[in-house]
Amino acid sequence: MLLTKKKDYKLYVEVKKEEKEEEKKLTEITFSNLELLHEIVMSSLPQQRLPRETGARFRSELAYRIFLLETALDVRGDVLVKSRRISHLDSSEKSLIHYYLGMAFTKMIARRMFQVDCLLPVSVIPAKEGGYLKAPGSNRNDLIGGAFFGEEYSVWSVKGRSQNSLTAIRIGCREVSDFVRVCDSPVSLKAVCMTYYDNGYLNAVVQIPGQSSLEKSRQVSVDFSREDYLRAYYHCVAGLFGTKGEKKMYRRDRKFFEDGICLGIPLYPTEETGASRTLHVGMSEELLRNVRQDSASFTSCLQSLCWQETLDHGKYMGGDFIYLY
């Protein structure tokens, strides 16, 4: 598949509660190629804490991630299916691809179905006492979900389908149940999201923990600055525009913002024709400046952003004020 090709897709998401198999709800999500690209670009990953001297490394890393997902998926009608192109890869290589896939779709599902604007791994959220938050256990991928203009937080776990998928979901339910309070408030939602293939078709399931998981909770509470949390969400896109002191690689683009800036990211050429492709990512320069600065006015910056309507339907603007085409 080519994520740069204009097309709408469907994904079926089943929501169910642990221990209540009869209470299932199947939802069909329709999304465009640009919306999925947006979720990939804005997926916060633990690897974003790795040292990178230049924005070129951020951009090449994103291009490779997009290449992996385009290689792993094919299109049948308006649904995504598993591609045979990755059948020769070993289990570790496939796990990495499915991890990237799961993070992007979990972010989309959380936003579209549960009004979660941001979804961040615990390990990329700065702790108040310095450093970063730590998950209550090893080999975990706990994520904290939040809204731009709200005080509630949710906790998520991302799982990929395996031969022991039921066990993986049960473990995920126990893991998210460990969290009882985030920033001195009760957790509003605990959920496990798994993407999987059913007869080759890509689907997803969201499971809400039941009482048996909640009873085994470790009663974990985490606390962090809301400003740091929101700023951390934008680190993945800020890195694309370069690091502090680096020569500016972006250009002015007032399509949405008066102080808009846009960056072109070269993607891998198409397999059929070898044609070059470029993904353009844009944002407000004031927003970028506030991400890079350690100030206490980040929420005010988001509230002050005013983007202009555009008749150009070839661009996608996310609710986080990041647009691409």
Image (spheres, rainbow, N blue to C red):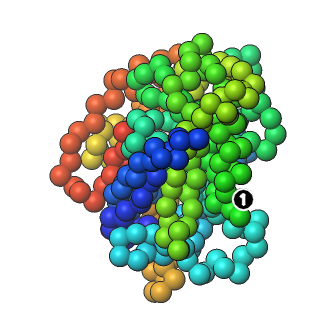
On the picture, is 228 further left or further right than 5?
right
| Residue 260 at least partly seen | yes
Furthest residue to the right? 138
* Residue at image point 69% right, 26% down: 215
Q: 133 or 29: which is nearer to us?
A: 29
Expressed as whole percent of the image width and height from the top left, the position of residue 82 reads 54, 73
Question: How many numbered discs sit on the rendered protein?
Answer: 1
Q: 170 or 175: which is nearer to us?
A: 170
Expressed as whole percent of the image width and height from the top left, the position of residue 64 reads 61, 64
* Res 114 quadrant in image: top left
Q: Tag 1, which secondary structure?
A: loop
The type of residue carrying mark 1 is Asn
On the picture, is 78 further left or further right than 274?
left
> Mark 1: few, some, or many residues within 10 Å (few <14, many ≥20)?
few
| Residue 224 at least partly seen | no
* Res 221 quadrant in image: top right
Instruction: From this view, report whether residue 91 is shown above or below residue 271.
Output: above
Expressed as whole percent of the image width and height from the top left, the position of residue 56 reads 61, 55
Which quadrant: the C terminus? bottom left
Which residue is disc 1 drawn over? 164
Furthest residue to the top? 184
